[in-house]
Image (cartoon, coloured by chain):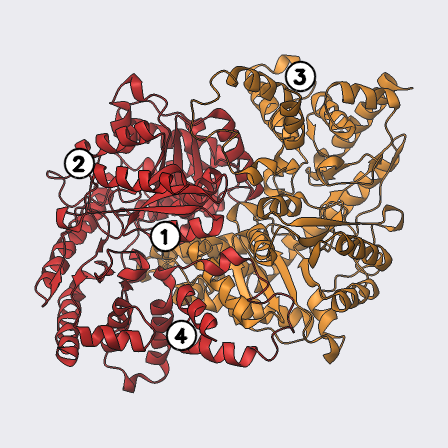
Chain colours: A red, B orange
Amino acid sequence: MISTLTRVSKVGYSQFNRNLVRFASSSAKKHEKVLNIETMHPLIKNVEYAVRGALPIRAEALSKQLKTDPSKLNFDKVVFCNIGNPQQLNQKPITFFRQVASLCENPELLKAENRHLISKLYPADAINRAEVLLKNIGSIGAYSHSKGIPHIRENVAKFIERRDGCEANPDNIFLTQGASEGVQKVLQLLTEHDKTGIMIPIPQYPLYSATLSLVDAKPVPYYLDEQNDWGLDRKGLEKAVHEARDNGVDVRALVIINPGNPTGQCLSEENMRDIIDFCHTERIVLLADEVYQTNIYQPEHRPFHSFKKVLKSMGPEYQEQELFSFHSISKGMIGECGRRGGYFECVHIDPEIMDQLYKISSVSLCPNIHGQIMVDLMTNPPVEGDASYPQYKEEIDAIYQSLRRRAIKLATCFNNLEGVTCNSAEGAMYLFPQIRLPQKAIKEAEKAGMAADTYYSMAMLEATGVCVVPGSGFGQQQGTYHFRSTFLPEEHLFDTFCSSLEAFHKEFLNKYRD
Amino acid sequence: MISTLTRVSKVGYSQFNRNLVRFASSSAKKHEKVLNIETMHPLIKNVEYAVRGALPIRAEALSKQLKTDPSKLNFDKVVFCNIGNPQQLNQKPITFFRQVASLCENPELLKAENRHLISKLYPADAINRAEVLLKNIGSIGAYSHSKGIPHIRENVAKFIERRDGCEANPDNIFLTQGASEGVQKVLQLLTEHDKTGIMIPIPQYPLYSATLSLVDAKPVPYYLDEQNDWGLDRKGLEKAVHEARDNGVDVRALVIINPGNPTGQCLSEENMRDIIDFCHTERIVLLADEVYQTNIYQPEHRPFHSFKKVLKSMGPEYQEQELFSFHSISKGMIGECGRRGGYFECVHIDPEIMDQLYKISSVSLCPNIHGQIMVDLMTNPPVEGDASYPQYKEEIDAIYQSLRRRAIKLATCFNNLEGVTCNSAEGAMYLFPQIRLPQKAIKEAEKAGMAADTYYSMAMLEATGVCVVPGSGFGQQQGTYHFRSTFLPEEHLFDTFCSSLEAFHKEFLNKYRD
């Protein structure tokens, strides 16, 4: 029974008590099913994924309870701050993007007999764009090229060229169903055997640890420096890689999330050069998760630089340095998560590896066309002079300014809490405050079989309806406790949101004060 | 060098000569890249995927050549019969489905001030449906529940209940990004170790062999009986499972594609009972790929029965028999391949396994919402009395009748060719004729380092622009040669299509006649 319990807590996924009951009752009929917890793929069993783990499962149950039996709850709304899902919290989609997408969806509207009506509902540039896309795609109901529609990959390449001021080749771009799919493919490709090591930041986005579990590669953690705005330290990287190699781990790649998730830092160019040089020296492939590249809140102090741009600026000595860069339509000011779209660019990657990536992409046939269309729109938005430009700019600016205000407001709120410190967000959509918990709370958590920050976050959810993710889901320095919260709740609700967190925190400390 | 060549031909993916050049030139700088063909994931290297392999790559090149330098080619169009991609060959989407999808995409259209204009462009039931969907989804730009939107899973369950006359539970349904994604997840979950065996039909759809390569499970082939309309034979199944087990393979599951791909058979209820009883006796999980369930061309002789319905009709003795059933929006009369949508139903699956499936789905966050919406429309189409019903019915019927006529026409064409025999299509979208090739052709193919049916298919492509997939990509009885062709070319082009195949075949035989 002890080993079963250990597994449950390691899997850390389903609700603890539910599993306990299940294990007890299922042991009798253990062998009735061919496919059961004992006979399934062992690596899947080991996967943890906190962003959608125990907390959100409880949050969903509370959401349901609010509809059926709200009287026992102290809140009238569950606020999902566990996941960067802006439109779930009523962020409005970009009008032009949805106009184009809806015309592509229903090309009947573009027929001559409907033109008169359509011109009253759609601006001319949205109609034009839909026509250009349809001409290049054919039907959006057909499978496309497995790497993505060539026309859209060309537009992505042009976007990268404008961003970085250096050449990009459409053949090096793979469109994907969100950045996650690309990351999973590349991490698997990199894994030669179970001693293959991939360096990941701690704290990290759990997609990385989950995927490494799944492909049976060794995560080689390196720690971000909380005292130093979650920056990277070359000495720390060197220590991590040398220790791993001394232990027989064959380190092949380094993952950097910039701007950071859950930590929100945006790296300086100098720091990036140092990291690239480290990879070059140590023969390590660089994976740059750059999905938050437009979520930049201190642009003068910490502007975004792509790793490709910095790499290309470092001269011919680095012309073999391998880099994968990932981008997504889910973040930025667009927030079209549900569409599942993104791309990755392969920089200095072996042509045979490119063929293998193409082959493996073809097994899933193609990324969905709607996601591809949104990648086109993201990388090729209205420009000055276009009919839709003023509205587009207004919408983007409004979302950006609001996100920036909320980032500051929430950090201030956290920093005002007793025993809590929180770095400001230079980028991304999250804050990752450190909470100092009283010993009594830590012991209570232990009794309940939970990490102490899970215990705290669960108490927050039950008291306020706010769902965050405990720091243990991302990794953190031993003996420290954190949680990750998005700053996505709607701005007009933000003061209430902050004061409910304050009230909860006070009550929690008072209850467990040593 | 010999081993390199062997690998190229085993991978069978890129164009032979291209790889040859690459291997030769890359051997010098072998160690310049950290990630290269020697250091990559070995299982990915082994994957073969013929549907998008050497033939379609050549077909794409020819497509480009038609635009730049058509004078050297004997045809004015490349016809992609290698893949069931109806809308690529101009099959029209179902009007109602696209109307609803476009309204969901642009909810601004549903605002009061636009209602007057919208009512001139959209029927009332499309507007209603979009409103119901948006009410249940919220924004289509947000991540949904990782198993799919609850409202849509409820509609899928009702569809299954209507189809089978027995209960279906929405909690047992996972929406997916196409059937392929579901199949890949379930096959991986079933693979405990590298001796795990999964029975697959030969010929098979290469998704299965590719996925088994990737998850390192053992394919346990069983042969479909070409003489007997590609039927399944229980004795053959028993022989396959016993032989595999005698060789230390731990057989866990059986894949059946019904209606068949590439073979087009539709199983009789009697045959299905026999197969279920075989699985029950041998303790084997049944995976039923039922994506062609509405592509049924001999409904009196061979109607479609779902495996779930037949299983449920067999009484309490079978109430633990595990079954996964897969469905898709890509096939049927809908053909919305590019959207990547589908679902699978879990029947009698262990609840802990359901939790694991949920966990692993959550790592990819959610299936794309557009695919989910199309699953809703597919399983819950207009019914008699709805404004859109007459048009919906007319469109579905027209596509169905045309597919049926084309299936017959193409089978007749093949059967009239010298040395070719072809079973008629009871279902699906493909024919899989057997071609008897002259020894001279077989030898020429050998010299070129190709399977003989690849050689034949490549010659067909070069002569006619028609792209099919060689039988060796699906597996076939040793010493036999086949190819798979869809019967999706447009009906008004069908006679020309058939006569160009006839002319090519005659010429090919004359050239190589022994």
Residue position for label 4: A16
Q: Are discs 2 and 3 located on one and the same chain?
A: no
Q: Residue A337 carries which label?
A: 1
User: Counting other residues with Cα less than 10 Å from the Cα at mark 4, is it few (<14), some (14-19), or many (20 or more)?
Assistant: some
Question: Is the C-beta separation of discs 2 and 3 under 8 Å?
Answer: no
User: Counting other residues with Cα less than 10 Å from the Cα at mark 3, is it few (<14), some (14-19), or many (20 or more)?
Assistant: some
Query: In the figure, residue B111 lies in which quadrant?
Result: bottom left
What residue is at 25 percent from the left and 22 percent from the top? A314
Secondary structure state at the residue bearing disc 4: helix
Q: Which amino acid type corresponds to the residue marked 1 in the rendered image?
A: Cys
Q: Marks 1/3: CA distance?
A: 45 Å
Q: Marks 4/2: CA distance?
A: 42 Å
Secondary structure state at the residue bearing disc 3: loop
What residue is at 70 percent from the left and 18 percent from the top? B74
Q: Where is residue B480 in the image (x, y as percent from the top left)?
A: 84, 36
Residue position for label 3: B73
Parent chain of label 4: A
Parent chain of label 3: B
Parent chain of label 1: A
Q: Which of B145 and B396 is in front in this view?
A: B145
Question: Is the C-beta separation of discs 1 and 4 under 8 Å?
Answer: no
Secondary structure state at the residue bearing disc 2: loop
Q: Say if A461 sits above or below B238 in the image.
A: below
